[in-house]
Amino acid sequence: MEKKVLVLNLDHTPVAIVTVQKALVLSFLGKVSSLVHYEYLSVRTVDKSFPYPAVVRLHDYKNIPYKGVLLNRNNLYRRDNHECVYCGSRKHLTIDHVLPRSKGGQTNWKNLVTACHRCNTQKGDKTPEQVGFVMRQPPFKPTLSYFLAEYAERNAEEWLPFLDLKTV
Ligand SMILES: [Zn+2]
């Protein structure tokens, strides 16, 4: 599989993942500079060979409105490691509103968790405290870095020093 390139803003915030071709074009256009290369890899053209960039940084600060990680079922399951936050089951996963909607609970990262069908049904229209459920981890809003770290650990260790692994 072709390795991807991490693009950082001028302030070192990760802003995008691009292909190596795109990274080289940006580099030729003078828009980015390489910070780290993948070891033992190079990009070849007909008569030249270039180091293969792993992390590049924009020369100009780009004001990219931070949209955060898209809130959807897949990303929510990923945040919770595909496990029910109440019992740890990995089967029949559903999405649970921690504070039920009927009690004013909102649909956002901090009020949604992955729950198995059984726990979700048992909890029903109550709060975790009311049914004696304890969450294995409190819900949090993941950063882009949080998801990138998963990819980086498997495919691009060169990125890890540039990822901010704190959660918000
Ligand atoms: Zn469960």
Image (cartoon, helix red, strand yellow):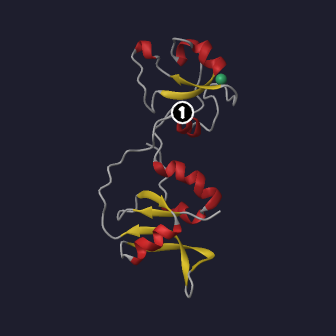
Res. 101 image quadrant: top left
Which is nearer the eye, 28 or 54? Answer: 28
The residue nearer to you, when weighing 159 against 51, is 51
Q: Which of 161 and 17 is in front in this view?
A: 17
Position of residue 82 relative to residue 167, above or below, is above
Q: Mark 1 points at which residue?
A: 73
Kind of residue at badge 1: Arg
Q: Looking at the image, is 163 positioned above or below residue 109?
A: below
Q: Horizontally, is 47 left or right of 22 in the view?
A: right
Query: From the viewer's perspective, is 157 left or right of 32?
Result: right
* x and y percentages locating residue 138 in the rendered image: 52, 32
Q: Element type at marker 1?
A: helix
Residue at image position (56%, 88%) is: 47
Q: Residue furthest bottom?
A: 47
Is 112 drawn above or below residue 68 in the view shown? above
In the rendered image, residue 38, in percent from the top left (x then y), is placed at 59, 72
Q: Residue at x 45, y 31 (%)?
A: 110
Q: Where is residue 123 in the image (x, y as percent from the top left)?
A: 58, 14
- Whereabouts is ligand 1, in terms of quadrant? top right
Q: Residue at x 46, y 36 (%)?
A: 71
Quadrant containing the N terminus is: bottom right
Res 124 quadrant in image: top right
10 Å crowding of disc 1: few (<14), some (14-19), many (20+): some
Measured as percent of width and height from the top left, residue 26 is found at 41, 71
